[in-house]
Image (cartoon, rainbow, N blue to C red):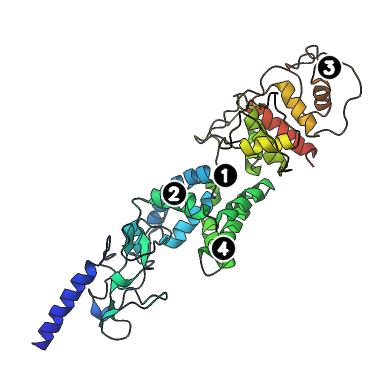
Amino acid sequence: MIKLIRVLLLILLSLLVLNSGPLTSSANSVNPLPYEDEKSGRNSNAYLSTYEFPSTKMKEDFINEIYTYAMRANEKWGIPASAIIGMAILESGYGTTRIAVNANNLFGIKVWGYNPKNGWQLKGQPDEDYEPVPVLIDYGKDRKIYDESKRRDNWYRAFTSYKEAVDYLAGNLLLNERYRFAKTNYEERRKKGWSYERASKEYLYDIANAGYIHLGGEYYRNKVGSIMDEYDLYQYDDRKLKDIEGHWAEEQILFLTEKGWISGYPDGTYKPNHSITRAQAAAIISNFLALTSTNKNIYFSDVVKSFWASESILLVAQHKIINGIGDERFSPNTFLTRAQMAQIFYNAGFYSQSVNNRVNSFKDVEQNFWAFVAIETIKQEGIMAGYNASRFGPNNPTTRAQMAAMIYRIHEKGLNK
């Protein structure tokens, strides 16, 4: 009789635990919970895989799904795709952990509180460090049933999909005040010529040391870094531009992209033959020279603070590299002419010696033309050339490919030093 009462009590308490909060469930029958198998003792943890060993195909399928989300997140928020994929592999066991299976949570991101609406909870967890959790039934060491409704740090954020988990990590968590500096460091290192591999690993070091995990930066860099090496995840950082293959400026465009000085469009194109705008030129020059603010007050009525290139425009204007067009206007979306391009390079000092003769190289550039000295000087340096021996085309628009090629020549000649 006593034994029967005890069994009935256990069933009743188990039902109470099962209904203690939203989105709670047993992860998988492979890993039973204490009230499902009291002899096995307490459950392991949320990171325990529901499979003993993921197969090679499972691993490949997981990476093939995640990398698309990671690349889009990289383009939108600037977090290295290789790091996102590597973190997802490590934290979710290729999508096989209990939180990955039950909550689409690839990164162990928690949501704090008692019975939060957007949380998933693995029941039967060991007593948490934050505060004691009442024990409902104690069958001995490691064989306890806890009052799960009294937990507040054992809730994992529940996502509707892997994509949502990636977007939350890259567009929310890693952009908050604690970790945002790591993204800035990553971008600066790329501009300085760091490889994707080195910059991405250092990114992991930065976020780990800032508190992303308690084991420290060196551990996380080595652990996730070895995964990134194994699968060459850096290939997803090196976004190939799909419309430059075979183009005359392909090599130069790829080189500048690798350096982080130029970038393509969100659809994966560079549009090399499109004309470049004054705003785009400002962004490229600012990145190329790693300009910093002079704190000089500059104002353009047609450049609002929310404009994508507003910071770059202010920087090039502060350094007197690209000036306004008058009336406190910058005209950011106007196409840049070849004469304006030559003047920008001249203003930036991309020459060893300014021309001191008054000999016309081009019939369509008179000596009294406003950019005559700039055009002749930049032509003398071998940075720009005419369409032929006598025609420069000063009022023709500059293409994005031409801009890339000219920046490449400046770098090769060391004139940006």
Mark 4: which secondary structure? helix
Q: State the residue position of label 2.
A: 167
Q: Nearer the viewer, mark 1 or mark 4?
A: 4
Give the spatial CA distance, label 1 vs label 4. Answer: 26 Å
Which residue appears farthest toward the left when viewing the image? Answer: 1
- Going by the numbered disc 3, the residue's amino acid type is Ser
x and y percent of residue 112 in the render?
39, 64
- Going by the numbered disc 4, the residue's amino acid type is Ala
Q: Between 236 and 219, which is closer to the camera in this rendering?
A: 219
Name the quadrant containing residue 117: bottom left
Residues at discs 2 and 4 in contact (Cβ within 8 Å): no
In this image, 68 relative to 273: left or right?
A: left
Q: Is residue 149 visible?
A: yes
The local crowd at label 1, few if under 14, some if 14 to 19, many if 20 or more residues have their Cα within 10 Å, is some
**The C terminus lies in which quarter of the figure?**
top right
Q: State the residue position of label 4.
A: 210
- Nearest to N terminus: mark 4 or mark 3: 4
- Nearest to N terminus: mark 1 or mark 4: 4
> On residue 180, which mark appears?
none
Q: State the residue position of label 1.
A: 238
Give the spatial CA distance, label 4 vs label 3. Answer: 58 Å
Instruction: Determine the residue positioned at 68% across, 29% down.
Output: 403
- Going by the numbered disc 2, the residue's amino acid type is Asp
The local crowd at label 3, few if under 14, some if 14 to 19, many if 20 or more residues have their Cα within 10 Å, is some
Give the spatial CA distance, label 1 vs label 2. Answer: 20 Å
Residue 64 vs 52, above or below: the answer is above
Q: State the residue position of label 3.
A: 361
Q: Nearer the viewer, mark 1 or mark 3?
A: 3
